[in-house]
Image (spheres, rainbow, N blue to C red):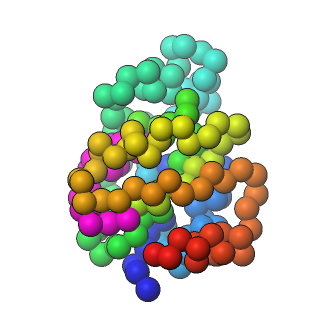
Amino acid sequence: MSKRLTAYFSASGVTKRAAETLAEAAGADLYEITPEVPYTSADLDWMDKSSRSTVEMKDKSSRPAIKDKDLDIAGYDVLFLGFPIWWYAAPRIINTFLEKYDFSGKKIVLFATSGGSGFGNTAAELKGSVSDSAEIIEGRLLKGSVSRAELERWVEGLNL
């Protein structure tokens, strides 16, 4: 079996809960992508055109800083990468994470949480943040509470 890592960014705790369940279901290690400056509820107000998240998402070159934990990515074959969907895309901090490490030859399976948005062009937009030899797979949108058994079936079906 491949060595697996579940890495995630969670602004409000929803993605964290999904990532913890997925890590258990996939037999994966767990890693939290932590912003250097935590997001406040005001930062996440998508109705406010001047909120931090809105400003970051409007600027495709935005790369919010992450706390450096010196993750040893070389030991993993498969990365489950989770995040909330913001404006039909991954938050820019996901680009920061992908550009920080070398994912050459690795499979990156996306999973996301969302109140209503789909993946949009997320996989295609993230491809530019990794080497050509990394494979990004648009995995699954997790809405509501998803059971460990359901995620185990999904992971088995991926044939990783």
Residue depicted at 71% across the width and 70% down the height = 150
Q: Is residue 114 magenta?
A: no
Specify whether residue 148 is in view: no
76 left or right of 147 in image: left
The picture places residue 57, in percent across and down from the top left corner, at: 45, 27
* Above or below, 18 relative to 148: above
Residue depicted at 58% across the width and 50% down the height = 112
Q: Is residue 95 magenta?
A: yes
The picture places residue 51, in percent across and down from the top left corner, at: 53, 19
The picture places residue 148, in percent across and down from the top left corner, at: 70, 72
Tell me which segment is drawn in magenta: 93-107
In the rendered image, the quadrant that contains the N terminus is bottom left
In the depicted view, which residue is nearer to us: 60 or 29? 60
* Above or below, 147 relative to 14: below
Residue depicted at 66% across the width and 53% down the height = 142
In the depicted view, which residue is nearer to us: 104 or 46? 104
Q: How many marks?
A: 0
Specify whether residue 65 is in view: yes
Residue depicted at 70% across the width and 39% down the height = 115
Determine the residue located farthest toward the top in the rendered image.
49
In the depicted view, which residue is nearer to us: 2 or 18? 2
Residue 72 position by quadrant: bottom left
The picture places residue 144, in percent across and down from the top left corner, at: 75, 52
Residue 70 position by quadrant: bottom left
